[in-house]
Amino acid sequence: MDNHNAEGEKSSQSLTNSEEKYHYIFMHNPQPMWIYDLETLAFLEVNEAAVNHYGYSRDEFFQMTIKDIRPAEDIPILYENINNQPSAEPPSSGWRHIKKNGEIIYVEITASSVYYEGRKARHILINDITQRRLAEEKIQHMTRLYAFLSHINQAIVQTKDQEELFNLICKIAIEHGQFRMAWIGITDENSKTVQPVAMAGHVDGYLTERDFSADNQPTGLGPVGTAAREGNIRICSDVASDPGMIVWRERALQRGYHSLAAIPLRCREKIVGTLALYSKDSGFFTDDEQKLLQEIGDDISFAIDAIVTEKESRQAQLEAQRLRQALDLITAHVYIKDLQLRYVYANKQTLGLFGCSLTELIGNDDSRFFPLEALKKIVEIDNRVIRGEETSEEIDINDPSKGRRVYWEVKVPIYDNAEDKNICGLLGISTDITERKLVEERLRESEIKYRTFFESSIDGILLTDALGNTLDANPAVCNMFGYSEEEMIEIGKKGLLDPEDNQLAHLLNQRNQHGRAQGEVSFMRKDGTKFPAEISSSLFMGSDNNLRGSVIIRDISERRNINETVLKLSRAVDQTGEAIVITDKDGLIEYVNHAYEVLTGYTLEEVMGKNPGILKSGKHTTEFYKQLWMTILSGNVLHTEVVNKKKNGELFIEQKTISPIFDENRNITHFIGTGVDITERKIAEKELIKAKEKAVESDRLKSAFLANMSHEVRTPLNSILGFSSLLGDSVFDEYQREVFIHHIIQNGNNLLNIINDIMDISKIESGEIKIHKHPVDAFEFVTTIKHQFALQAEERKLELKLTIPSTKETIVYADRDRLNQIIINLISNALKFTKEGSIELGYLPKGDQVLFFVIDTGIGIPAEYHQKIFERFRQVEMENTRKYGGNGLGLAITKNLVELMDGHIWLQSEPGKGSAFYFTLPAYKEDPGNK
Ligand code: ADP
């Protein structure tokens, strides 16, 4: 070409010389040539070949510039070429010209600069290389497509996953097929659309914006939809003009897609999708490539088939494995036998039962595993199954070594395949129902038991439904109410009620809340009579899963009577005054009554479970208790007196009776002890004895007294009578008679004293004596007494002393006459029993009391008489008692009087040392409470 060009430059020099010759050559040259104006770019001359080749007439050429025969996109490079150097590089695709018919041709250009008719021009020689170029392009396309195919095949071999394969194919289409975009869509049978699943290249959102329909509608009329629908490769050579592309055209061109091919993809002869390849060049796909595209489609379809088959078989394997796993999990025995009844398969349960592995089992029949009796039955059933029968039977296997098992066996024949009715074996499923069987049998037994119980129960039993309607009534309840069973069911629970008693409704309410309830209810029999009953009702779930109620009725009329009696008795026991204790046969306390609690101070709670020995006082020997137990344990009733100790430590005497309580077999079950506190009585008894002794003593004293009295009274009386009779005797003179009269008076006074004393003591003892208390001035009182006795004391040469306190006046609250009597008695005694020395009389205020005393220096009183001398008719007994005279009543009267005036009397004395008598009397207070 460069040579050609150089030659052109040389020939321009000789143009003027042979212009005509050149013109001829120019015009008739078989290669198209023209000359154009470098400034205007207008054609200045064209040859015939150019006219023929481009389709424009010479005149038409002259109307045009060279821009008009160039594609618009080449214009900028054209200018560059013209302005810089003629040999500037053509566009990458080569120079292109447009013929009058619009066809674009590829050309090689040889240009040379010339002056033509005075104008700067360029001479152009055109070599149309379109054909060559297309051939080259074809080869290039084919090479690309082969590379594409070859890579696809590699990918198919290497990839086992459809999604991965599709992605790879699209990528290969871009890399090796050099397509602008590629995608694979799968036909969705429901929506009849082709859904993109893989894509590569310049997608730029193209696939998300439009549906590709596999149906006959606008979005289905493009190559993809048509290919998917019809199963043929569809090609769109020029996106810009193809009417099928109307929906996508604009968008496709925006993304630089100028042509495309849609290749249907199949799986097992069925169209499943499309591979779409987009080229940046229009007319990329021609008929020649169809075969290759077809091959690509076939190879991908083959790969899809393979993947699906592989997947299916993997799935099938997995399913089989899962099935086996599932079968191993279920508790039933599942197994398959062939027509010879040899095991082909068995699940884990079955293998466990047989105690061998699957490999060990396969090929064996049942003869190895079952006793003869069972085997016969199994073989008989199996034979029926492989003849086409489906069986389900219970089989009872009694293996002497393994015990009894019961199975529910379902067996069905197995066929070669679904259509063919060729039996090739049997499938068996055996469920171990031994437990259920036993439960059923037990249930049956228990049903019989409960039915018997129901029928024979003494208690009435009603079964009801959830609404309370009677479903069943036992004979006892019918008897109880006097209705027949049918009547009972008909009348319902309500009809049995005492209309005045609403307790049942309340109880049933409670039962419905808590599931059970108990209580007492009044019922009415058929004959209208009423009876009390104890009922217990509960809800339970029936075997049909419906709620049921049970009502157990017990006629308690009799028990109520007994209860009342028992109540009475127990009240009697509880309320009786006797202490009652009940122990069990081991002697442990079960009950004590109230009287026991009061007597001992222990409560029931404290002694419950203890031994009655807690009351032991320690006053009895072990032997005593041993004897006690021996008596009662031998079944005898024991009566005894026991000294016991209360909780507070106080001792008491209990008169006790302990009796054993026997059951109907004469076995001792309990002991009952009753006791009465006889402490008081005992004391009283003792006192009675003392009193009796005292009475005897008194009697003796009285006799002595009376003897004395008779002497005392008789002596003065005899004396009086004697002297009185002498008075009438004239033998005695006046003086003698005076003496006699003196004796008579003296003895008469003595007699009077005696009689007064006796009268006093009688009055005191019979309670007749009256005390009139007044305030008495002690000082004034003792002073008067002193004066009264002054003479007598002087006569006996005794000093009569007065000892009084120096404090203010002392007033006693006493009966003056009685006080007088007391003091006179004491001073008379002192004078009587004192030979020499003194008699001291006085008083001393002591708190709210006044202490009086009479102290002498006389013969004194031995200690053992200090108490006795205050008793009636008691005197200190000595040989010379008589010499002092007296009747032994004085101090008894004195003591009684002191005590009647709320005082107290005692003495201090020793024989030979004198006696001191003290007594107290209440001091007078200006207090109304004293009066
Ligand atoms: P009687 O009239 O016998 O004296 P009492 O009851 O006054 O009776 O006295 C009882 C006895 O107490 C007297 O007999 C005497 O033995 C004794 N007795 C009373 N007072 C004295 C006394 N002051 N000194 C010694 N003995 C006395």
Image (cartoon, rainbow, N blue to C red):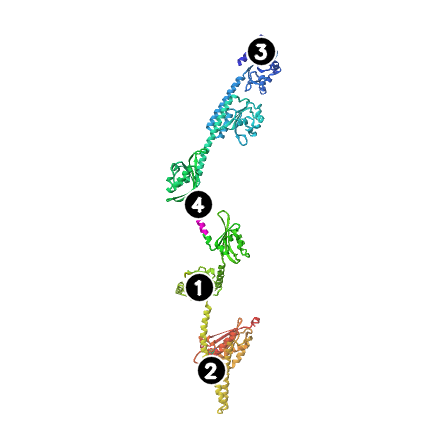
Q: Answer with mark 2 or mark 3, whichever residue precedes in sequence.
A: 3
Q: What stretch is highlighted in magenta?
A: 437-451
Q: Decide if residue 319 is on the left or right side of residue 48.
A: left
Q: Position of residue 806 (x, y in %)?
A: 54, 74
Kind of residue indicated by mark 4: Arg
Quadrant containing the C terminus is bottom right
Q: Answer with mark 1 or mark 2, whichever residue precedes in sequence.
A: 1
Q: Nearer the viewer, mark 4 or mark 1?
A: 4
Q: Does the residue labelled 3 lie within 8 Å of ligand 1?
A: no
> What is the count of numbered marks?
4
Disc sitting over residue 673 in the figure: 1
Alpha carbon separation for disc pair 2 and 4: 120 Å
Q: Nearer the viewer, mark 4 or mark 3?
A: 4
Q: Answer with mark 1 or mark 3, whichever residue precedes in sequence.
A: 3
Kind of residue indicated by mark 2: Ser
Disc sitting over residue 436 in the figure: 4
Q: Name the residue under label 3.
A: 27
| 364 vs 234: above or below | below
Alpha carbon separation for disc pair 2 and 3: 220 Å
Q: Nearer the viewer, mark 2 or mark 4?
A: 4
Say few, some or many: other residues with alpha carbon within 10 Å of mark 4 (under 14 / 14 to 19 / 20 or more). Answer: few
Secondary structure under the numbered disc 3 in the rendered image: helix
Disc sitting over residue 710 in the figure: 2
Q: Position of residue 534 (x, y in %)?
A: 50, 56
Secondary structure under the numbered disc 2 in the rendered image: helix
Q: Where is residue 736 in the image (x, y as percent from the top left)?
A: 49, 89
